[in-house]
Image (tube, helix red, strand yellow):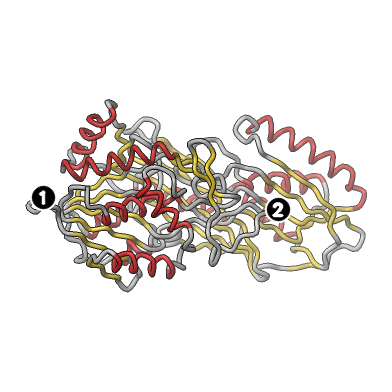
Amino acid sequence: MQNLEPKEVFGIFAEITQVPRPSKKEGKIIAFLQDFAKKHHLEHATDQAGNIIIRKPATVGYEAKPGIILQAHMDMVCEKNADIQHDFDNDPIETYVDGDWLKARGTTLGADNGIGMAMALATLCSDQIKHPALECLFTVDEETGLTGAFALDNHLLKGKSLINLDSEDDGQIFIGCAGGIDTVATFPIAWEKAPADYFAAKVSIKGLLGGHSGDDIEKGRGNANKILNRFLYRLNEQTDLRISHIDGGNLRNAIAREAYAIICVPHDYKEPLRIELNHFIADIEQEIGKTETGFRMELESESLPGQVLAKELSVRLIQAVYACPHGVMAMSRDMPGLVESSTNLASIKMDGQEIIITTSQRSSIESAKHDVRQMVACTFKLAGATVTHGDGYPGWKPNVDSALLRTAQQSFSHLFGETAKVRAIHAGLECGLFLEKYPHLDMISIGPDMRGVHSPSEQLSIKSTQRCWMWLQNILENL
């Protein structure tokens, strides 16, 4: 990576990939940023949440211009393929170049939002870039709760404009985002002794694309939790299905790529089970095969477990997950092509005493966000689950009269002879929370092309990063 252009950006990103930085475990990357500020003799401060701000004075001739804030988050989504051995708390990310794409070997790359951090840091250590007084804000725990943005002090920032570097589309300027909230359902586990004369098997869903639960939700990708549960429902209608264990998905903001269940069926259903699996695979491939070319469903024999979920509980669980909505709920009436509201059936986990089902809802309209939240909650309450909600976070209302937006548009046109597309995004950015604390802020969000974020297929375009770096420098110079 050290030989990629722009070297000043990719050199820093290479260093960032060597620093473990899972959400809520940002201690090592905090130390990295503090050391960076000290090395370059820059003023810096760390707040109680762990957010870091690094300041650099205006270059000569820019002292009278209003200050500008560059912002990125420190943490990364930690997802890996099941066959990969990787400890995100301690191991560096192993990267490689594939044509124009920078990728990681079987794990998330962390370009979300490591490349945004790298561009901000490259700006701070450059003697060539002209800019007003500069503040670079690095927040913690964006991916699992926006904790850093929530806790940010409302007197810390001095700049009048903010460029968020957490977008994933070259040549696009984001001026709004969706708000979000989590809904978690829990079922107390009741066990029964496993029938002695039953056949046990592990049913697995693998190879799905997954992706970001906001930005990718409208792309028709399969949800491993929904597909697995659909198969279980089908079996339950045909035979005395018993479930010993179920596990699917990981993160609330990622579409579930993998899921499995350990099931028990009567011995005389052993062969029909395999036939039914083949019929089911054919159905799913017909429905999503053109999108999910890597989809696999496997059946492996297992030793008969000692206990299974109580039959009544497993029926309620299967029916509730089947009824729970997943995907796009409404499209925007104001911005064609933009998802307005959605919900993601993120994960199903068992901890020995409870079955925990995590979902997340998003909408650019606050009332619609809560409408979908209540819809999901009612689905699980009707099945006897206990339902709780997270605090949620606000959306970011677009400002089409933004002076920063005009500068960014003019800069892109000047550099590349193209018109930058102005968009809102169906994903959570920290900008909505910044605006609550600093109502005066003029904000945009930009970034290079990334694909497959929040999954091991995450990749970053090298050429797009070059363009975004040129664009950012030009914006700063022409504010």
Residue that badge 1 annotates: 62
Q: Nearer the viewer, residue 177 or 463?
A: 463
Residue 295: x, y in percent? 67, 39
Pick whichever of labels 2 and 1 is earlier in the sequence: 1
Classed neighbour count for the residue bearing mark 1: other residues with Cα under 10 Å, few (<14), some (14–19), many (≥20): some
| Label number found at residue 82 | none
Say if mark 2 contacts mark 1, CB within 8 Å.
Answer: no
Residue that badge 2 annotates: 260
Residue 225: x, y in percent? 63, 49
Q: Nearer the viewer, residue 319 or 346?
A: 346
Residue 186: x, y in percent? 58, 63
Q: Nearer the viewer, mark 2 or mark 1?
A: 1
Relative to 50, residue 332 above or below: above
Q: Is residue 157 left or right of residue 375?
A: left
Please give the name of the residue rendered at 20% of the width and 61% of the height, measured from the top-left corner.
157
Q: Pick the quarter of the image with the C terminus.
A: top left
